[in-house]
Amino acid sequence: KENPWDTPWSCDEIGMRTPAIAEGAQPPRGKVQPWVVNNCTAEGANCLETHCCHAVGHRCFKKNEFWATCKQSCSTEPDPNDGNRTWSCEALGPESWGLAIKGFPSLYCISLFMPKSYEGSLMGTQLKSNAGIFACDGYDIFANTD
């Protein structure tokens, strides 16, 4: 022993086993970690190195040794969107939860407002408070004026 507290390795159980996800069950849902935004791949980009995707329900599927992309499903049949080339469709990584950085399910919001009415100040207050549409994972706001 190098130190008095060193003990030999043992495979004795010291507690209950961590429960596994039942086969066919969905993984637990929740917020994704902030690193997902920067490290995972957007739809249409090469995910060969990241093995993870941004889009909800997408998975990284391998085409060949040089290319893989995020898709909801994959077929080994000739792909009409890819010059009728075939894919290996090897799944690289898990199915994505999407960018649920504020909670699951991820929520994309759209709003139309009139800035010169009471809605302008209401939107301003929501923006400062990160409330309303600004609490969504992603959003677009359209105004009736430029």
Image: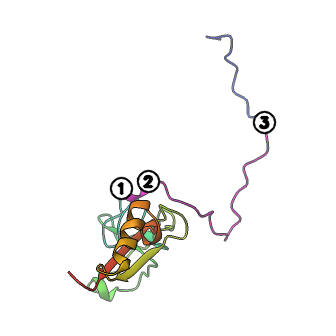
Residue at screen point 57% across, 61% down: 30
Residues rendered magenta in the picture: 13-37
Coordinates of residue 17 in the picture (x, y in percent):
76, 47
Mark 2 element type: loop
Q: Which mark is residue 14?
A: 3
The N terminus lies in quadrant: top right
Q: Amino acid at mark 1?
A: Asn
Choose between 57 and 87: the one closer to the eye.
Answer: 57
Say if 105 sits above or below 51 in the image.
below
Q: How many neighbours does mark 3 have within 10 angstroms: few (below 14), some (14-19), or many (20 or more)?
A: few
The C terminus lies in quadrant: bottom left
Q: Are marks 1 and 3 in contact (CB under 8 Å)?
A: no
Residue at screen point 44% across, 53% down: 34
3D distance between C-alphas at marks 1 and 2: 8 Å
The residue pinned by badge 2 equals 34
The numbered mark, 3 or 2, whose residue comes first in the sequence reads: 3
For residue 84: magenta? no
For residue 23: magenta? yes
Q: How many neighbours does mark 2 have within 10 angstroms: few (below 14), some (14-19), or many (20 or more)?
A: few
